[in-house]
């Protein structure tokens, strides 16, 4: 791994459809996923401090920064697949993942699609869904009504089960 303050870069080759990423530090892998209209450079002020304890993997997501020229689609699913491929290319089997804003939606999709890859998921200023599909539009209309009708705890249990998660009880997940 690169030493703290000495980044290594993984960049798209002429014939490869792979995102650009910078790597810093040593320790437990931590992926930092940026929001829309910025790049991984937004994490530069944090990289020096965090690289003392983490092997940071900071991509420029497809359509952003040094990955701007990569072709679409630019869906959350595609961006998450890019992150998983990057982790594969770097030999990172499991990582903590922090997603900021739209990067949080990407991080959630990585955890949903490949749960064994994500050790910890940290979401900052993000959202849990958007209104891009018919299903999401129906959920957005029904969720506030259902929340009022059954309350927050039953709603959380319902959503966890619907998403394939463990059964939630007062004792904790799966108990």
Image (cartoon, rainbow, N blue to C red):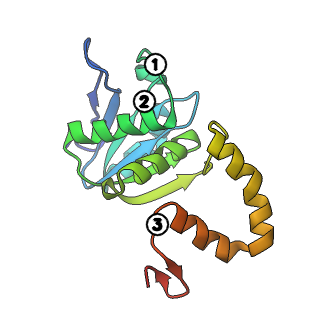
Residue placed at 43% from the left, 14% from the top? Answer: 69
Q: Secondary structure at mark 2?
A: loop
The x, y position of residue 104, in whole percent, is 53, 47
Image spot of residue 28 (x, y percent): 28, 56
Q: Nearer the viewer, residue 133 or 128?
A: 133
Asked if residue 143 is positioned above or below residue 65 in the image, the reply reads below
Q: Nearer the viewer, residue 69 or 74?
A: 74
Q: From mark 1 to mark 3, how far is it between C-alphas?
A: 35 Å
The mark found on residue 60 in the picture is 2
Q: Answer with mark 2 or mark 3, whichever residue precedes in sequence.
A: 2
Residue 170, image x, y percentages: 55, 86
Looking at the image, residue 61 sits to the left or right of residue 51; the answer is: right
Q: CA distance from mark 2 to mark 1?
A: 8 Å
Is there CB contact under 8 Å for labels 2 and 1? yes
The residue under the point 22% across, 36% down is 89
Left or right side of 45 for 84: left
Counting from the top left corner in percent of width and height, residue 142 is at 74, 56
Provide the secondary structure element on which disc 1 rests. loop
Query: Where is the N terminus found, in terms of image quarters?
Result: top left
Q: Which residue is mark 1?
A: 68
Task: Tell me the crowding category of disc 1: few under 14, some 14 to 19, or many 20 or more residues within 10 angstroms, Cα based.
Answer: some
Residue labelled with disc 3: 165
């Amino acid at each position: 791994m690169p030493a703290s303050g000495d980044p290594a870069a993984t960049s798209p080759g002429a014939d490869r459809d792979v995102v650009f990423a910078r790597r810093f530090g040593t320790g437990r892998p931590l992926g930092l996923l940026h929001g829309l209209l910025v790049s991984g450079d937004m994490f530069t002020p944090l990289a020096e401090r965090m690289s003392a304890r983490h092997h940071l993997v900071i991509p420029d997501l497809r359509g952003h920064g040094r990955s701007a020229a990569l072709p679409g689609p630019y869906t959350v699913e595609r961006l998450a697949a890019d992150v998983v491929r990057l982790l594969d290319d770097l030999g990172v089997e499991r990582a903590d993942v922090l997603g900021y804003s739209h990067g949080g939606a990407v991080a959630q999709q990585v955890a949903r699609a490949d749960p064994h890859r994500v050790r910890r998921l940290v979401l900052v200023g993000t959202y849990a869904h958007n209104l891009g599909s018919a299903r999401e539009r129906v959920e957005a209309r029904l969720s506030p009504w259902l929340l009022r009708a059954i309350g927050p705890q039953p709603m959380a249990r319902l959503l966890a089960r619907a998403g394939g998660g463990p059964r939630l009880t007062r004792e904790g997940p799966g108990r």
